[in-house]
Image: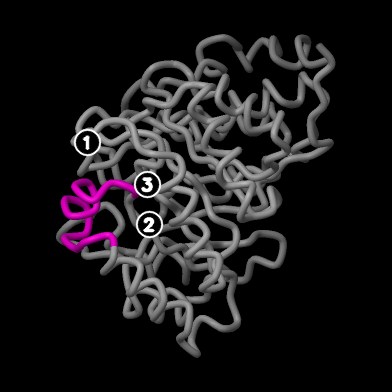
Amino acid sequence: MVRTFPPRITLREVGLRDGLQAEAATLDLSAKLRLYQALVRAGQTRIEATSFVSARAIPQLADAAAFLAAIGPHPEVQISALVPNLTGAERAVAAGVDEVTVFLSASETHNRHNVRRSVAESLAQAEVVAGAPATSSVVRSAVIATAFACPYEGPQDPQKVADLARRLREMGYAPILFGDTIGAANPAMVSRLLEATERHLPVREIGLHFHNTRGAALANILVGLEHGVTLFDASIGGMGGCPYAPGATGNVASEDVVAMVEGMGVATQIDLTLLIEAAALAQELVGRELPSACLKAFDLGEGTWAAYAH
């Protein structure tokens, strides 16, 4: 069987948002800035930096505006922020983001746990954000959480999820990313959802966000590549989780994705050695061992990865 893959993909680094929101420790501004700078040095050009949600709900990201101010001008990096509503979107744009990302769940139960509203209400809020003058100058993307399975309702219907994606696209959102919030997806599930969605959206407007709870994230990314997907979320060191999804462990590690796809001849324009160094810094800052396979496999001090890579 001959497989073809896109010549290049884009990683959207979500460790600073999805990763840090799940950590017990709250990093101060200087620590976050060190991690951001390490990611940029490695070549990350698309970074989800924070979210403008309730500081009571996610205290780790209460400094969203201050952090974006500390980043300063960023012509080489597209900075995004997760926003729950119009107020959050307006705050994010005022703080200087290039992209606002709305979110809702495919699962009614998870959506009510996560944002305390129905899926229909979240769609209505997304429509308000899409039509707001404040968001007209930025990229508007959307994430559909629990797109494959929900901790409360189980597996989700691919046609239902594809319909949500279609409705968001009609509002003007692109790209639209499918989130495997509890890491329950398998390659067959990914293929079924992509096949359902490709009837409504071009593949260039589809992204994938996998958690590695059951160790299947890289296999699922491979299926995405086979379908021509070129946008993937990943988190430095494999940090991440969802406070409203029992069993949601870390995202797939950015460095593990880069190691796999670069070895397959798919370019990322990211320096893997510097990315592993950024993962080591993330591990130091959060004060716990992170699940990254590359961190465990390669000793940068001895140049082991460099020898492997070349």
Q: CA distance from mark 1 to mark 2?
A: 38 Å
Left or right: 201, with 31 as reference point: right
Q: Mark 2 packing: few (<14 Cα in 10 Å), some, or many (20+)?
A: some
The disc label shown at residue 145, or none: 3
Q: Earlier in the sequence, mark 2 or mark 3?
A: 2
Give the labeled residue for mark 1: 153
**Residue 113 on the magenta span:** yes
- Using the image, determine if residue 185 lies above or below residue 76: above
Q: Earlier in the sequence, mark 1 or mark 2?
A: 2
Secondary structure beneath dot 1 equals loop
Q: Is there CB contact under 8 Å for labels 2 and 3?
A: no
Q: Main secondary structure of the magenta part?
A: helix
Q: Mark 3 packing: few (<14 Cα in 10 Å), some, or many (20+)?
A: many
The structure residue drawn at horizontal position 38% and vertical position 45%, both measured from the top left corner, is: 18
Left or right: 89, with 235 as reference point: left
The image position of residue 98, as x and y in percent, is 58, 70
Q: CA distance from mark 1 to mark 3?
A: 13 Å
